[in-house]
Amino acid sequence: MTPKITCLLIISVLTCAIQAANYFKPEFSTAISEALHTALISLKKETSNVETSEEAADKLLQLLHKKGYSRSKPDLVEAMLKILRKMNFFGCTKEQRSSYRTLDGSCNNLRYPEWGMSFRPQSRLLMPEYDDGVSSPRLRTSDGMGTLPNPRTVSNVVHANTRKALSVEPKASWHPFQWGQFLDHDLISTPVFTGRDNNPLQCCENLENENLQKMVCNPIYVPTGDSFFKDGTCMNVKRSAPALNLDCSTLSGPRQQENQLTSYIDGSQVYGSSMAELVKLRNKKSPEYMAVSEGDNLPFNDDNSACVLTVKSEKCFIAGEGRANVVPSLASYHTLLVQEHNRIVNVLKGLGWTDPEELFQEARKILIAQIQHITYNEFLRWLLSADTFTRYGLQPTGQGQFFTMYDQRINTDIANDFGIAYRMGHSWIPNRMVLSTEKGENVNKMDPDYKDLDQTYFNPHMLFMRGKTGAHRILKWMSRDNCPLSDRVVEDSARNKLFLQSGISFDLAALNINRGRDHGIPPYWKYRVNFCGENVNNPDSWESLTWHTENSIQLLRNVYASPKDIDLWTGLVTEDNRSQVIGPTLNCILGAQFKALKFGDRYWYERPEPEGFSVEKLNAIKGTSLAALICANLNDPNFLMPQNAMYVKLQGNPAVPCSTIPKLDLSSWRK
């Protein structure tokens, strides 16, 4: 079907593009208008056989290449492609019949094709509360008479570890922490302002324009007498960049933030959220495979500024999501999933699959299904209460049963508030990274295979160690050691030494609080009452904090003038979980988001073909687990792996040889 390009639609695209340029880069306004006008006229002539927005975007890119735009103004091209994708310019004709997802998430929902796609404004559970009603960070107290406490002060009083030793979850392994972060990087990434040529803004210095400073900067000034940072220290914090709505109206409405990723659980951290990203990740000679470097590690990034290299011969890694190098354990998960994709391709080849593109897409579909199944069957079962799991319908269907409650009325865009709430996992961040022995045994602090976490930020060195088997050694360590307790405490590795380089570091707890205020996130109490429906008689009273211990309430009273001032993230992580992993308000917020991601996903793995699988294939997917996924790629049949990898070895969760844990059975895929 030939795309219907009407004059009205062209005018809409041009108008939106010009407004976007005026807002972000005024010098591109005329260029965008001319380039789009020329390209769209050419595109109308040359797209008689084009059916998808992705194919059309590629065609537009080719036309722009011919005219030299992409070489001289890469930002211009990216801006135009974003706008075309956002407006679903070319419809969903082919996607309606496809068994496979688009990379950018478009056309998952055929009624609302833009829902859940990349570069969308984040949704909201509650309306934003900016100080000026439009965009100024929420800094005033609830009564409007005072100023909220400094984020670093809140961090020092409420989130510091005053215990002598690290408190750990008695049953959980490190995998909940790392799966949680890995999953987060599949769901949400909020861009921040950058300076010219993408250089970092220096928000601790006065910019030329005071209004510009307020728009792009929100630094954290360390209070006098801080126990770690010197007096006068300033954390260079940039504001999140505002999103542009599909009708260009955000230029005058309440400020919203953008999600650079697809909202769906679709392996975007493995495959990317655009064709431009995927091209860099596929094996060029055998495109059914994902590219790897020596030792089956992630491919190398041509840009060595993407990480911190301490050994000249080493390289930064590249993955489907830009934060893969943040910590070695995260890079290990990225490595594992790429290895699993390639393993699936090899098995499918043995079952009669031959076409490279079909092999790639089916392996991608299977891998996404594994990610979804592990998330809901293992990770969320560990994280959420049994009541939340049932109330929101998060439990997988039984063997031989399809999920039949897909609802295209559900907006799957990730909620801004969820993005703040989900940072609860920062209390699980370890203070160390360890390469276990080959048998999975821990090493002591004096061993070179033991690293303090602050030594590993953005440094991939550990994955190059032990004959470039570092990823597998880290996976073994995570399977056998306990993660920190889920509570209000953020360890010093992240609270004082986050991204420590050349004596400069950040405080992750303070950043979380600061980010919530930047986004106009309402205070904690409003989520209890207005979103979760809790009956709170007098939210002005400290006695209303019925989900907090006396100790937590006292800490909060030491910094906040009123319980109505408590920031969302701080209020959530100080809730008493009462023998569960997280408290009730977190359960409510997370349950609602994960329900939307399941019920609003047309390609949910439990749905029947063509979007999902046959009964036989679905049963095979449901037979897999994180333990099976790890063991299938460790190449160590004798490693003793806890059967449920979210937990350490326990009574009822024995550690068994990897050789006894069945791999994903792909026999139903035989051609």
Image: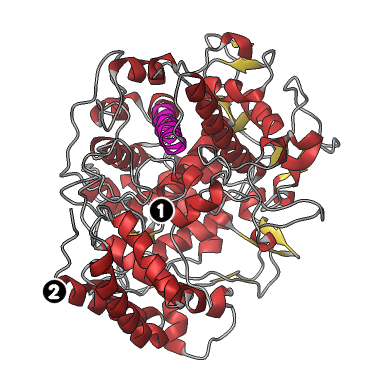
Q: Are marks 2 and 1 in contact (CB under 8 Å)?
A: no
Task: Classify residue 294 as left or right of residue 644.
Answer: right
Instruction: State how far apart marks 2 and 1 are (Cα).
Output: 29 Å
Task: Find residue 26 and report its image quarter.
Answer: bottom left
**Label 2 belongs to which residue?**
8
- The residue at the point 40 percent across, 25 percent down is 381
Question: Depth check: 311 or 90 in front?
Answer: 90
Quarter of the image for the C terminus: give it: top left
Left or right position of 286 against 89: right
Range shown magenta: 356-375
Q: Amino acid at mark 2?
A: Leu
Magenta highlight on residue 34: no
Q: Nearer the viewer, residue 459 or 63?
A: 63
Residue at image location 68% in from the left, 53% down from the top: 316
Residue at horizontal 44 percent and vertical 71 percent from the top: 65
Q: Which residue is mark 1?
A: 261
